[in-house]
Amino acid sequence: MNVFLEAFRAALISLMAHRMRSFLTTLGILIGTASVIAVVSLVQGFSESIKSQFADIGGGTLTLRAENNNENFRTGKINNIHFKDVEALRRRVPGIGAIAPMMQVQASGASYKGRNTTPDIFATSAEFQAVRARYPEFGRFIVESDDRGHRRVAVIGTQLRDDLKMPENPVGEYFRIGDEWFKVVGMMEKRGEILGFSQDNYVIIPFDVGRALMGHDRDPFLSVSFTVTNIAEVEEVRERVKRAIRVSRDLKPDAEDDFKVEAADSVVKQFEQITTMATAVLGGIVSISLLVGGIGIMNIMLVSVTERTREIGILKALGATRNDILVQFLLEAGLLALLGGLIGIVLGFAAGAGVATLIPNFPPASVPLWVVMAAAGFSAMVGVVFGIMPASKAASLDPIEALRYE
């Protein structure tokens, strides 16, 4: 242990004796590590933001949506969920709790006191609030009596309120959707933006009112979210839903499903897989600069061996073994790389945070602890790997020839 500590001290003294050269040598590792951390922090920050959108929707919430492939879009034969599918869920599938169909309504925009905007317009049921864990900041959400009475009421997002310059609490205000007048009964909590796209520029109206606006003979874009009364039976309920919807859609026994039944948390898992793959690919690309930095360390260490040939000869003459010399030079290379890695981690996180700040409404950068540890460890490993050749050369020098070296 004393030998190791002495070698560590000697390595530090050697690096401090050539500060500028040590800094320039470690610059490649520094830039490489900073690039990796910056890229990972941006991807992970975006990933955490997306996952937070689903944080309140548990694995007991399922969503039924139509499935379309390239052939559907190419031919124009788009699959949709139908109103009869919603009724099949309500009447034929045991084990389902709240059901919230969601329909996108086509309208010519919204207007209020001469001001106009084009929000997303959705029609849904009172159960949406419980299924999606979304709640109003002012007023109330749609209730069952709104649907039964075909009331022209609406719940709006904060962006729509701001665009139409409604009062801070817009409850009770009247505005138009297309040619129809609606009364604001609630405003939902703000959700913010993702990549510059607002999540609060929308109107929610009662489901049957939306059907009336669209026309009952039209086939709108529709999805259905619903809860499972017993979370332990999620898979059983999923299979019951598939069987009921296949019957509702008149699918033949050998026909493939043209719909999906997926859990909310499965969407998060799929997104995590995508971001993990993206992180690995992007991290791998920018990690190439770490190899370049490693080659730089190897070159400088070879020069250092040549410069210190007489010193190596003196050390061997005083009793230093081959392993002592090997450890000292490996420690120097490892310290160079580790120093660059640590500085690179700090600069990389600062760069990631700076880029995230410059991009409007981009989620804050986030760096998991395992990434920091991996970056520091990999940097040190690069230094050791590329320091093996110079260290081996130094350890193999003949002491007599080394002492004669000029």
Image (cartoon, rainbow, N blue to C red):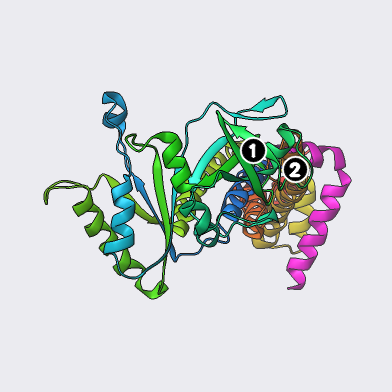
The disc at residue 243 is none
How many numbered badges does the structure rendering display? 2
Q: In this view, does 263 lie above or below 179?
A: below
**Amino acid at pointer 1:** Ser
30 up-or-down from 236: above or below = above
On the rendered image, what quadrant is the C terminus found in?
A: top right
> Which type of secondary structure does the marked residue at label 2 adopt?
helix
Q: 199 and 44: which one is in front?
A: 199
**Left-right relation of 29 to 385:** right
Cα–Cα gap, marks 1 and 2: 21 Å
Residue 379 lies left or right of residue 168; in this view the side is left
Left or right, 291 with reference to 100: right
Residue 2 location, x and y as percent? 77, 72
Residue at which label 2 appears: 353
Q: What stretch is highlighted in magenta?
A: 1-29
Which mark sits nearer the N-terminus, 1 or 2?
A: 1
Mark 1 is surrounded, within 10 Å at the Cα level, by few (under 14), some (14 to 19) or many (20 or more) other residues, namely: some
x%, y% of residue 92?
Answer: 26, 63
Point out residue 291 in the picture as x, y percentages from the top left corner.
59, 39
